[in-house]
Amino acid sequence: MDAPKFPTFRPLYQQIKDLLLERIASGEWSPGTYIPSEAALAASYDVSVGTLRKALNELVAENVVIRQQGKGTVVATHDTDRVLFRFFNLWRHDGERGLPVSRPLGRKLRKATADEARDLGLEPGAKVIHISRVRDLEGVPTLVEQITLEAARFPGLEKDPEVLPNTLYHLYQQRFGQTVAHADESLVAVAASAQDAEHLDVQPGDPVLQIRRIARDYQGTPIERRISTVTTRHYGYFNQL
Amino acid sequence: MDAPKFPTFRPLYQQIKDLLLERIASGEWSPGTYIPSEAALAASYDVSVGTLRKALNELVAENVVIRQQGKGTVVATHDTDRVLFRFFNLWRHDGERGLPVSRPLGRKLRKATADEARDLGLEPGAKVIHISRVRDLEGVPTLVEQITLEAARFPGLEKDPEVLPNTLYHLYQQRFGQTVAHADESLVAVAASAQDAEHLDVQPGDPVLQIRRIARDYQGTPIERRISTVTTRHYGYFNQL
DNA sequence: TACAATTTGTGCGTATGTATA
DNA sequence: ATATACATACGCACAAATTGT
């Protein structure tokens, strides 16, 4: 009946979780690093092992760390299939899935458009890097991606890796210390533009799926804006509820 | 290096979880029921409270039960907003969301098509109930739904509730004891058919989003097949990764 | 192959705090 | 206030997986 009380205290395990996440986000424990054992961490924070486990298990649920019996606890990287497929939801209509092969279309450093600045939380006119590419699935052009990144976070990316790898998120993480931890996607159906139609081997005006993604780091700050235009002849966007 | 071993044992808490889920799926604890307390259940299964908590917490994570401090543990129902929005992912482009209002188009008992039988796991030619309706969002027709149900699971639904409620899943649960626990969705972009175009106030051939959903019960058995055709002028399908 | 050390996973028990009726 | 139920926190013992000796 009362108004909801402001939480007067924060459970100890959540405080520990915040501390652990901070050490990960700060780069003290970079992706791929094995962090100290439960026992060692519990002792260092002067809490029980159970409390520390509860904190770690929440980080597991959020895909921040991976625990393996006998080995230890490692900060999640973007090179495992598990993490990879988390950000790739296109399945063939018969239920199979294949990894895409990318063909570059262009890459340049320029000023952000109004939309890009809004989505990335930047000042209007801030410098961004724009990447566009086509991705083939089993040899069939299926996807056109328009990617925008804040230039300050990815210094030199407009030129430097002469050939971009297929999985960009791994590159972001390894080369620039930028880890994509979450992403929001919004899907709409649109008519294919002339350019997209050509790349995707469809007719201009044909219906295509447009996926607008904003990828964020551990703290929720936007890192990448990605607009994918997909022909859904052979593939569909799959989601589990 | 070795081939992955077949799990020689199943943790106790998972066995308990299975037993609890079975009592829920069987209807012994129907949705809305408060199940016995941790202490009582732990005693009845002769396990520790901690083990029983771990089993229950997994059911919480799977949205099967809801726990409330001081009250108890209740089997989840389809009448709370939380569960409701889990199966409704359309957001307005400005970030708001409104609940839809439904207008019936038709309802009949007939034989399943080949596609319907496959999706629902039925014999070819089995009896199904087909429902079609238009849903308005803030007064704007936005969605056409084609729903197919196995007739045997929903006896009389082709006629009985003269007026269908807005939220069908609650009806399935209350009237027929059929609880939608999970769902798979596959999204594609298609050209609007003449009929859909008329209902959605778009031109035939205009791009629309098609959502093919198969809803399943606790055991994963298909309950409902739903094809939603959506105009994405004002709304988009939102997903968090 | 055998064994030991390390690390996480499972399971038990207890005490105390907080929310609800 | 009291009783009930879940939430938090502590501690311990042993099992299972991994790695190195």
Image: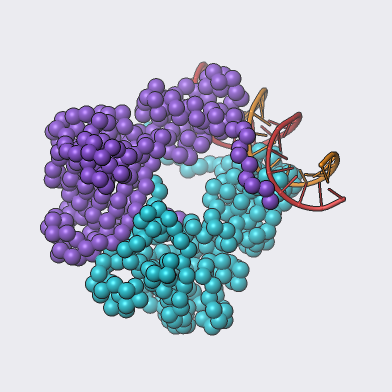
Chain colours: A cyan, B purple, C orange, D red
Instruction: Please determine whether, in this image, residue A21 is positioned above or below residue B109.
Output: below
Q: Residue furthest front?
A: B124
| Residue located at (58% from left, 49% from top) | A59
**The quadrant where residue A139 appears:** bottom left
**Near-viewer residue (C3 or A111):** C3
Instruction: Residue A160: give x, y in percent of width and height.
Output: 57, 81
Nearest the viewer among D10 and B203 is B203
Query: Can you say which quadrant of the picture contains the N terminus of chain A?
Result: top left
Number of callouts: 0
Depth check: B219 or B144 in front? B219
Is residue A15 among what the camera can see? no
Relative vertical location of residue D13 with respect to residue A83 in this rendering, above or below? above
Residue at 55 percent of width and 52 percent of height: A63
Relative height, residue A224 to residue B165 (above, below): below
* Residue A114 coordinates in the image, percent (x, y): 36, 75
Q: Is B155 drawn above or below residue A176 in the view shown? A: above
Residue at left 52%, top 67%? A167
Is B36 or A66 nearer to us in this picture?
A66
Q: Position of residue B186 (x, y in %)?
A: 34, 53
Q: Is residue B149 left or right of residue A2?
A: left
